[in-house]
Image (cartoon, helix red, strand yellow):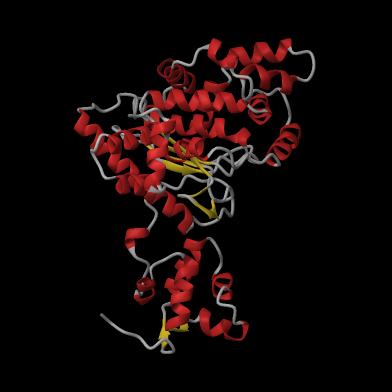
Amino acid sequence: MIEFNAMETLQISPNILRWAAEQRGISLDALVDLLGTPSKHDDFAAGKLSVAQAEKLAKKAHIPFGYFFLDTPPASVQRGIPDLRQLPNHEPLSIDFFDVLDDVLRKQQWYQEYLQEQGAQQLDFVGKHPFKANIPAEQVAADIQRTLGITEHERKQCKTTSDFFTLFSVKAEGIGILVFKNGIVKSSTRRSLSVNEFRGFAIADPMAPVIFINGKDSEAAWIFTLAHEIAHIWLGESGVSDLPANQQKSSNKLEVYCNRIAAELLTPKTQFLDAWEQAAESKFDVLSKAFKVSRLVIARRAFDLGKIDWATYQNIADASNKQKSSSGGDPYRNYPLRNSKRLTRAIVSTAMSGGMMLREAASLLNVRPDTVMELSKHLAIR
């Protein structure tokens, strides 16, 4: 093992420092400022750091200390999912994002092995309508609707958009999609996810498809993000999205297509136009209540169908973006939401039946072993 003098000066590649800053989602200047010695700023930015300073910086950037001895960024932590984000000047995907992605992939791998042991088959809806096939969005949306099986009665039974999101996610998980919704990295309340970085991502795996929704987004945005990512699953296209609300047009044809499918799934064109004409006043509120989606989704649909101008839509979008998601609540209700209810039940059930150690189950769910025991009670697993 190599030993260092804590005061020994190292020469770290500036390329590695810039990469470390990107992983943290900040500039190089902001990264070296975390060391708290302004007089040494230029030396730090040039890669001249003591061992102690490099160790401190590695902790601040959430990367292994050993990476500072490389000349180029390690390939193993490069982007592992197509970046489909559309906002101009969006933040680089940070180490927080990659830690979330790695955590989800670890859970997905366990679940794939679990399904194989159960003799499960691949899901026929994953990639059922390939993007290149150019199938009408209405046809894809209708197929998703039939497969999910959300009835009009069930939609009407939902009192709020939050209730409808719950119904929507339960239906998605019911057909085999793992739906994660979390606003932090794993269980670390000190590492909040950034909505300016991403709003959701989809992994179109034929055995264990995954959707992750950034819980730090406004509650009103969750439903459309879920619908958008489900469209990705149907097209067989993985990717990370930001779903910008302030763009009239996008150059990314895949994202435009997924948005069209999501809009048709949530607000079918014929029904929407009929409801729009019948609503004498307060159209956004009336249709929001009828379709159980946010005023923002109604406004976007109205704009796309030529019922309102861009300025009207933008005013509603600005107001909607000020709404924050709720936090706190019963932790035993939140754990399955963070880890996918379907996956949580499979892990806890396996642990309680002796198929895996409690500590392994706890590690997968980012909780303590005793929490796994409590979860088994809340999920009524014996």
Q: Is residue 84 above or below residue 337?
A: below
**Residue 17 spot, x, y in % from top left:** 46, 72
- The answer to which image quadrant residue 373 occupies is top left
Left or right position of 267 against 106: right
For the N terminus, which image quadrant?
A: bottom left
Q: What number of labels is visible?
A: 0
Q: Quadrant of residue 70?
A: bottom left
Q: Position of residue 375 (x, y in %)?
A: 41, 36
Q: Nearer the viewer, residue 179 or 186?
A: 186
> Which residue is pictured at 45% across the width and 48% down the height?
83
Farthest-out residue, right: 281
Q: Nearer the viewer, residue 178 or 336?
A: 336
Q: Position of residue 305 (x, y in %)?
A: 64, 23
| Residue at horizontal 47 percent and vertical 50 percent from the top | 187
The vertical placement of 342 against 147, above or below, is: below
Which residue appears at 51% of the width and 40% of the height? 331
Which of 101 and 250 lies nearest the eye of the viewer? Answer: 101
Residue 1 in view: yes
Say if 105 sits above or below 276 in the image: below
* Residue 47 visible here: no
Q: Quadrant of the C terminus?
A: top left
Image quadrant where residue 67 sits: bottom left
| Residue placed most toward the observer, 54 or 254 | 54
| Residue under the image location 42 percent in, 42 percent down | 239
Residue 145: percent from the left, percent from the top?
46, 18
